[in-house]
Image (cartoon, rainbow, N blue to C red):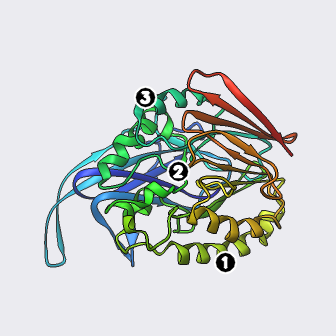
Amino acid sequence: TDTEATVVWVTDKEAISWVEVAPVDGTNFYNVERPKFYQTYLGKRVFGTEHQVRITGLEPGKKYCYSVSSKEVLGTRRHRLHYGDIVTARIYGKRYPGFNTLDPKKESTQFIVLNDIHAKQEKMDALLNTFEDGKTEMVFYNGDMVSQVPNVEILFNGFVNASIERFARQIPFYLVRGNHETRGVFATKFLDYFPTPTGKTYFTLKHADTFFIILDGGEDKPDSDLEYYETAVYDQFRREEAEWLKKVVESEECKSAKHRIVFLHMPPVEGHKMWHGTRQVKESFVPILEKANISVMLCGHVHKYSFHDNEAKFPIVVNSFEDALKVKVDGNGIKVDVVGMDGAVKHTHSFK
């Protein structure tokens, strides 16, 4: 966000971990001792193999570099921990890990959107060519990046590793939960790997005078469907989310922004994909959003491109599974290019 960042990594052995962070201000990272941030819970530092460290107290629109460290926990005896070696990421050279905090006062931004990759690496690699070094400031994954979540490996092999190789040590990505990310025994660990400012799978961001609303439509079929094995409570989930959304659109942060962009995996549009979940999304979310002067909603789910300017009081762009959205926001408005795997622009939309 504008004042926080979260660094996530895994180790193959249990460890207690921390992040050291420093502003990029011309001084060497090792010039002075840098503050350490740990993962904590109920007043204690946490150890394990999954590490999620939240860095707080940052300044908007500033560049920072960071180093991650993990100290192996060899074993425990009562309240004692026995430690082993430390592994750390050294900050040498020009390609050090770093990030820019978001900046609500910035005049422009550029980001890309991918969706419905379903762990197909070649497709993702081709679409990530849309990424422009020095220009792309954020990446949004608009749902169904994998087909199910039976284990953590599918997340890394499906899209996280490719993200790290291409940009994610320095540029943030935000994962909009799609209906397929809700499936599998590991799906309940979603927020352990993709933390949000709200601690929910729906949240907001503000950057470049643009208010981003990230929504979670849940599953597409009724909660009673046999496919969910009596575990689904998405009707209640969407009702709770709608109550949160009512407060969001009334907030000064939302009202004061020049642009408002909504991300939602399942598009609230009529057609053959208007299943139970999509219908509930339309009934629950759209009336609230229609009061908020939304600039555009970006969706996926149906695996083909479409544009709708008569389904709601705001335009809806539905991206296919073979294209990326390249979005530029500035004082003139919002430009959305639909770009294919060959780099060719297929469609262009402009919004105020």
User: Closer to the camera, 348 or 28?
Assistant: 348
Query: Which three-letter amino acid code belongs to the residue tagged 2?
Result: Gly
Residue labelled with disc 3: 122
Q: Which image quarter is the N terminus in?
A: bottom right
- Say what secondary structure mark 3 lies in: helix
- Say what secondary structure mark 1 lies in: helix
Q: Residue furthest front?
A: 272
User: Closer to the camera, 82 or 184?
Assistant: 184
Residue labelled with disc 1: 243
- Say what secondary structure mark 2 lies in: loop
Q: Earlier in the sequence, mark 3 or mark 1?
A: 3
Residue 325, compared with residue 22, is above or below; it is above
**Residue at position x 51%, y 41% in the image:** 98
**Residue at position x 44%, y 74% in the image:** 224
Residue 49 percent across, percent down from the top left: 27, 57
Residue labelled with disc 2: 143
Query: Does the rendering let one see residue 37?
Result: no
Q: Distance between the residues labelled 3 and 1?
A: 40 Å
